[in-house]
Image: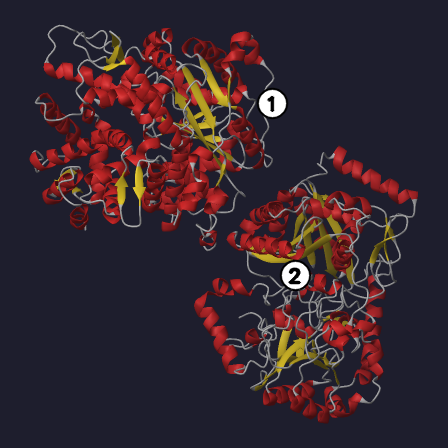
Amino acid sequence: MASNSSGGSSDRQRIAQQRLRIIAGHLQRPVDGDSAILAAECKAQGSKPDTSREEKTVPRRRQEIMKWNGWGYSDSRFLFNKKGQAEFTGKRYRLSGMIIPGLKDWFECTFGASLQHKTPATPLLNSSAVQPPTLNEAFVEELKSTGIPFSQDAEDRVFRAHGHCLHEIFALREGKFGRVPDMVVWPNCHNDVVKIVELASKHNVCLIPYGGGTSVSSALECPPEETRSIVSLDTSQMNRILWVDEKNLTAHVEAGIVGQDLERLLNESGYCTGHEPDSMEFSSLGGWVATRASGMKKNIYGNIEDLVVHIKMVTPQGVIEKSCQGPRMSTGPDIHHFIMGSEGTLGVVTEVTMKIRPMPEYQKYGSVVFPNFEQGVACLREVARQRCAPASIRLMDNEQFKFGHALKPQVSSIFTSFLDGLKKFYITKFKGFDPNRLCVATLLFEGDREKVLQHEKQVYDIAAKFGGLAAGEDNGQRGYMLTFVIAYLRDLGMDYYVIGESFETSVPWDRVLDICRNVKARIVRECKERGVQFPPLSTCRVTQTYDAGACVYFYFAFNYRGLSDPVHVYEQVEHAAREEILANGGSLSHHHGVGKLRKEWMRETVSNVGMGMLKSVKDYVDPNNIFGNRNLL
Amino acid sequence: MASKAVYSRDPMLKKRDDFEDILEERRNSSDLRYALRCYAPVVYKGLCPSKAGTLKSMVLQSDQLHYVIHQVCRETGRAVDDVQEEVSSILEEMAHRLQLSTVRFFAFTLSKVFKTLFRSICVNEEGIQRLQQAIQEHPVVLLPSHRSYMDFLLMSYLLYTYDLALPVIAAGMDFMGMKFVGEMLRMSGAFFIRRSFGGDKLYWAVFSEYVKTMLKNGFAPVEFFLEGTRSRTSKSLTPKLGLLNIVMDPFFKGEVFDVSLVPVSISYERILEESLYARELLGVPKPKESTSGLIKARKVLSEDYGSIHVYFGQPVSVRSLAEGRVNRCQFNLIPRHIPKKPSEDIHSFVNDSAYRLVRAQEENMVLKPWVLLASLLLQNQVSGQKRGIALDELTEQAVWLRDLSRQYGAFLHWPEHTPPSEVVSSSLSLHRGLVRISEGRVQLALGQTGGPAAPGEPRSAVTPEEELLSQAVIILSCASYRNQALHVFLRPALLASAIHTASSNKKQEVFNSFSFLRNMFSNEFILCPGATVQDFEEACYLLVKTGALQVTQQDVLVTERGHRTLVFLTSMLDPFLQGYQVVCRFLCEEATEALTEKQFIPAVRKFIIKHLLAGRLRYTEVLSSDLQKNSLAALLRLGAVRKIKGAEQGTLKVNTVMVNSLEDTLGGKLPTQKAVIARL
C-alpha cells in the first residue's frame, strides 16, 4: 500500500522497471509451482518444509504473531506512555514507533475518559476456563489416517471461536469463553477439504470454515445450541497462487491466502488484483467470496463479484464449479451468486480464479476540504454522475476529520508545523470555513501518470464547484492510514472504558445526507436514553460511490463508566442504529455481511419468497446442516 | 385490566406548571422600549439561514413541484411556462412576508389593546423553557387551540415577549378580504391558504412544499390550528388532518430526525366573540371579515374580558409517537418527491395523533369558576325554576362541583384564599350580560326586557319566535362556557347516561350502551378512535374513585351518595341526547325526497323552533347548528343517511327504519343491541 508516487523517475524508466519486474516474476514461477505439480505434492506436504511458506503471513499457530484478545499483530499496539503521550509500537506501519501528541487530548475531550481510569484486559489465556472439547472419536480416527494436521489445543480453538465484534473482543478481554470449536483442522489443498467434508458428512460433524477471522457479523460464533462436535476448518495453509495466466489476465489462487500476501506475490510478477478491503492484512480470499467483500479501489477494479472468474467450492453434495472460464455467461441464474455471500453455510471455497491487472504505474493521494458535509456529498454525487471517481474517494464528516487530525504524528521540523499552521489559517480564516463544520474528502488516483494528472484536475475542478479546496497529499494519505489503525485504536479505548465499533450500509444518493444525520442523531439519543454518561462519538463517512448510491460507514464509541452492562447497552444502541438505517432506505449491509448479528432483518430485506429460495438451496446442498454456523438464514 | 394505564393517566397526579402574568410588566414599563428591544431568539441547530424571499425560490425549484408541474402539463396539455406561472402566483398569494418591524408594531399596539381588554395574560414559563429547548433541537410545530381571532396574534406576541423564534402561521383565506389588515398579518408571519382546494393537486403541491420547506430548514416554527377553524361552541372540534400530515411527512421520509409538536391551550375567561358565535349558531350569518367591521368592533374595547391563560404543553415527539406504529420503510421504493396518497397505517396514525393532541389541548385548558357556574345555571334553568337559584345554594353547588371536577382532573383555576361566595359573585359580575341577580337569586338573563346581548335590535312587537331566539343567544353563550368543562365530565357522563338508558345493571349491557353513545357522539366530542374500552375503564375508575359507583365483575351499581353526581352528569349530556333525537325525528317526519345538504340546517331549525314554541322540547340549546351538523355527520357516518351524488348536489337519502331505531335507542326505548344490529 505504500505510495508509489515518490521518486522522480521518468515514465520510460518506470515502464522499463515494471517490465523487469514482470520478467523476474516469470523466472520465479517454478518456485510458486504450478497446479499439476502441487496437486501431486499435496499429500506429502505435511512433513516437507515448504520454501514459500516462510514468506506467508499466517502460521498455523496464529497466536504466535497475533493478539488472542484484540486486533492484529502482537507487536503493534497503541499505548499511553509514562508522559501520557500516545504512541504506536512495533515497526510494521508508517505510524509505528511514533508519538501522537494530539491523541490524548482528543481522547479525553471526546469521551470524557481519563488516563487514571483503566480497564486492562486479562493478560493471559487461561486454558482451564475453556470447555473441554466434545470429540467425535470416529471422525478423529479417520481424520488422523488422512494425515491432515489438526489440533485440540485450547488456544487454537479459542482463537477460532470469534470474529471482531465488540461483544466478542470484550468477552475475551475479560477471559470469558462461550462455546468454542472442539478442534481445528488445517487442510493443505482442495483435496484435503474434499476429504474433510466427506468425513464430516459421514460422521455428522459440524464444520465452520475459518479464513482470516476478521468477521464483524458474529459469523464465526459457534451456535451455543450445537450439540455435535464442531470443527473449525482453517484455510490459512491453502495460500498458494497456483498459476497466473497473462494472456487472459487471470490468476488461480487457493482461497486461504490473505490479502496482503496475494498482493505482494502478484506484485512480484508485476500484477495486482486491486482488491483492497480495509481488513486486507488479515482477511482471506475465501472470506471475501463468502461475504461479498468490497475493496477500497473498487472504482477501478470492481468488488469481489466483478473480480471473480471461477470459483471452486466443496459442499456436502460434492464440488460445485463452472466448466469454463468465459467472462460472462447466460446460463440461468449465476451459480456464483449462490456461493458469494453464502457465509460458510453451504461449503468451503477452496480455489478461485481472479482477474488481475498490471500494477499501476503511478499512484497519487489527494484531499479536498469542504465547508460542510452537505457540499462534500454533493461533490461526490457529481463525481459519480460524471463517472470519474478516482480509485478511491471518501468523505469524512467533521468529527472524523478531527479524529484524523488527532492522529497526526509528531512533526519533526518547525517548517512543517509552520506550514500546517499556515494551511489552517488559510482555510478557517481566509476562506471562512467553520472548523466545526468543515469536512474532508480523501482521494487516491491510480494509473498512468499523465492520465492520473488529468483525472486529478477533473476531480479537483468538480470539487471547486462545491466550494472544495485542495488540501494536499499528506492529509489524503493519513486518511487511508486511519482505516488500518482504527481497529488497533479500539483496543486502546477498551483499556480506558471506551467501547465502540463500526458498521456500514449502502443507500441511494438522495438519502445519503438524511441517513447520515438521522443515524448519528439516533445513536446520540439512544445512548442518552440508556444512561451513557457522556455524549458518544457518532461519526460517519461516505466510503464508496456508485452510479445509484453510496456506501456509508459509521463509527460509534462511548465511555461506559457507570454502566453495569456496557456490552448490552452497546448492542441495543447498534440495534437501534440498524433499525434507523433500514427506516431511512439503507441496506442491511454493503460488505460486512449478515452473519448472526443481522439475521433478524433478513426476511424483510429479501422478502418471504427470497428467504424460501435461499432456504431451499441450503436444504439441497447441505441437508444435514454440516456447515452449521447458522449464519444468514 | 387496564387499571394500571388508567392510574398512570390519573389527571390528579399530573403536576402542572405555575403561571406568570406577562401584562404586569407591560403595565410598569414602556411599551415603546419593549417593542424596540433587542430581539435575538434561539434558533434550530440545523437552521439553513434564508430569507422569506429565498424560501419561495427553494419551493419553486423543489423536485416535488417540478414533478407535479410536469404531471399537470402532461394531463392538461398546458405549456410548462404557463403552469409555472400559475405556481408562482399561487405562491405569491400564499406566502408570508415575516418581518420584524411589523412584529414590533404589533408588539406595541397589542400591548395597549391587551392592557385595556384583559386583566392579565398568564403563561406557564416552564412551558416556554421547554419550547425554547425544543426549538433548538428539532423543527417545531405549534398547535394552539382556536377560540378567537385573537389567538394567533396573541401567540406571536407571546413568542416575541419571551424572545422565541416567531412562528409562521397557516391562516384561512378569509382574512385576505381585509385589505390592509391582511397584508399586516402577512408581514407578521401569516401565510394564507384557501379553505377548500380538494382536487387541485397543483395547489396542494405548492402548499405542502411551502410548509415542508419552512419546517425542514428550521426557518421558523410552523403554527396552525388543528381544529381548522374557531370553535363557536368552545368545544374542541374534531381535528383536521391535512396540515398535520404535511408536517409529519418529513419525519416519515427521513428528511428530519424528528419533529416536535407543541399543543398550546389558550383559555379566555370571557370570549370576545361570545354573542357573535351564539348568533352564528342560530343562523344569523357571520359578517364577512372586513376592516371596517373590525373598527366597529371597537366598542369591545371598553369592556372587561377578565384574564387569558396560555399553557404551552409538553412537546410531543413525532418520532416517539410513530415508534412501532409506522413502518418508514414504505417510502424506500418510490422517489420521495413523488406525491403519494398516505397509506392506511399512516392515515390512521395521523388521525390518532391528532386526537391525542387535541386531548392534550383540552386537558391543559384552564377552567374558571364561571364555567362551573354556567353548567349549574343551565341545568337549573331547564329544571323549570322560574325564579332562579338562591345565591348561597349556587355557591354550595359550585363548591361541590369544584371538588368533583378536581377529582376528575380538571385544570381549575379557583382562587384558593378567597371565600367561595366571593369567587362566585365576582365571576357572576364579570358575566353580567348573561346572568341576572335579583333578591338574592340568580338566573340566566332571559327576561322579557330583552337580553343585553342584543342591543340595537328593535324591542317593540317581539314575536314569540324572536323572543325565543334572543333567549337562545343567552343560552348558547352560556353553554359555550359550560362546554369548556365538557371534556372533564364527558367520559363519566357517557357512562352515567349509559347506566340511565341501559335496561339492566349488567356490566356488559352498560358497556354496550356506553359504546353506542360514544359511537353516536364521536363527531360531537373528542373521543379518540378505537379507545372505547379505555374510555369505559376510565369512566368507571373515576366514578368508583369518587364513590358514585360500585363496579363488580358483573354489575354496575349506583351508590346512595352517587345519585347526585349521576344526575348532574346525565343532565350534562341530556341536551345533546335530545338534540340528536330531534334531528332523527325531523328526518323521519319531515324530510322529503329532495332534501339537500344545504337545505338541511334551515329546515331542521324551522322544525325545532316549532317544537320549542309548542313546548315539546326542553332544551333551547338544540337550536345550535353545530349540534345539528354533528348529528347529521354522525348519521351519515353510521349509514342511516346517505348522500346521493349526481343529480342534485348532495341530496340526502334517509333510511327511515334505521334513523327511527337510532332515535329510540337514544331515548332508551330500545335496547342497544338492536340498534347495533340495525346499524349492520
Q: Give the secondary structure at mark 1.
A: loop
State the image quarter where residue A252 is shown. Answer: bottom right
Residue B216 location (% of width, % of height): 52, 38
Q: Is residue A602 above or below residue A540?
A: below
Residue B40's label in the rendered image is 1
Label 2 is placed on what type of residue?
A: Asn
Within 10 Å of disc 1 (Cα), the crowding (few <14, some 14-19, many 20+) is: few
User: Is residue B525 among the parts visible in the rendering?
Assistant: no
The residues tagged by marks 1 and 2 sit, at their Cα atoms, a distance apart of 49 Å
Within 10 Å of disc 2 (Cα), the crowding (few <14, some 14-19, many 20+) is: some
Label 1 is placed on what type of residue?
A: Ala
Which of B212 and A265 lies nearest the eye of the viewer?
A: B212
User: Is residue B602 among the parts visible in the rendering?
Assistant: yes
Q: Is residue B311 above or below residue A360?
A: above
Q: Furthest residue to the bottom?
A: A145
Q: Is residue B559 above or below residue A235?
A: above
Residue A111 location (% of width, % of height): 73, 46
Q: Give the secondary structure at mark 2.
A: helix
Residue B462's label in the rendered image is none
Q: Furthest residue to the right?
A: A413
State the image quarter where residue A495 is shown. Answer: bottom right
Q: Is residue B470 left or right of residue B203?
A: left
Q: Which chain does the residue under circle 2 lie in?
A: A
What residue is disc 2 on? A299
Which of A239 and B120 lies nearest the eye of the viewer?
A: B120
State the image quarter where residue A26 is shown. Answer: bottom right
Marks 1/2 in contact by CB < 8 Å: the verdict is: no
Residue depicted at 43% across the width and 10% down the height:
B113
Residue depicted at 72% across the width and 71% down the height:
A212
Residue A330 location (% of width, % of height): 51, 77
Which of A201 and B397 lies nearest the eye of the viewer?
A: B397
Residue depicted at 59% across the width and 49% down the height:
A519
